[in-house]
Image (cartoon, rainbow, N blue to C red):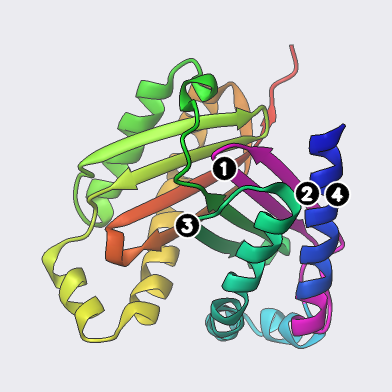
Amino acid sequence: METKKKQVEVASRIGKLLRDHFGKGPEGVYVSISEPFVTIFLRRFIAPMEQVLLEQNDLLTIQHTRDKVMNRLLPEITAIIRESTGVIVDELYYDWTLEQYSGLLCGISHQAADRSVYTYPNSELVNEEVGHITKKAEKLPDKVASYLLNPRTLIIIRHGILVEIEKELIQLGFEEQLTLAKRRLEKALLMKSKQQFEIYLEARVEDIFVNWDFHSDKSIIVFILTPNQL
């Protein structure tokens, strides 16, 4: 019950924060606390002006604007998670699926936690498939690990994925442009392998989110799942 109370508090505060800064908040905010991970799934999150841009297929403008706002909000979101749950978030990622009006925030703590409780069948096959996809986009990752937090949430963490030209672009200040390009490319590649992932996971992949910490040469992928009925 205590965890449920914390989740409700985070959902309420994050919903209000987004509403205050975007003019319209998500219709649903779903929080999962699975230490060292905290995930916040946003449903039906689209502002009126963004809806107009979406109808014009101007996704890049929406993503650019959201990135500007979110960069200002990340410290406050981290503080909300810490105050409401006691989890100290050291890394915070976000991504959107604009066509589905959905979004995801994922916090990771460096505090000691037993990640082995999130093991699942076919994890090696999932990690291998992610490695193949990443190699197509940039290079084979140095390391891939994945964690099934609950039947609806799979987190995949990749280390060592940047090639030299990407590192140079980051040094030159093109981090935002690189993010926009990689987001579109990698999500398209992941979608092509969606059916294979669904076989391994015995679940439908309903949504895919991707983001990077370029300075740590690290990336996360989050699958939102619906388990197959027995």
Q: Residue at x 76, y 64 (%)?
A: 14
As helix, strand or loop, the secondary structure at mark 1 comes to strand
**182 or 215: nearer the viewer:** 215
| In this view, 153 is above or below 80 | above
The residue to which callout 2 is attached is 30
Type of the residue with mark 1: Phe
The residue to which callout 4 is attached is 8
As helix, strand or loop, the secondary structure at mark 2 comes to strand
Graded by Cα atoms within 10 Å as few (under 14), some (14 to 19) or many (20 or more), the crowding at tag 3 reads some
Type of the residue with mark 4: Val
Residue 28 coordinates in the image, percent (x, y)? 84, 56
Q: Residue at x 85, y 49 (%)?
A: 8
- Whether 23 is among the magenta residues is yes
As helix, strand or loop, the secondary structure at mark 4 comes to helix
Q: Residue at x 74, y 58 (%)?
A: 42
> How far apart are the alpha carbons under marks 2 and 4?
8 Å
Report which quarter residue 63 is drawn in. Answer: bottom right
Graded by Cα atoms within 10 Å as few (under 14), some (14 to 19) or many (20 or more), the crowding at tag 2 reads some
Graded by Cα atoms within 10 Å as few (under 14), some (14 to 19) or many (20 or more), the crowding at tag 1 reads many
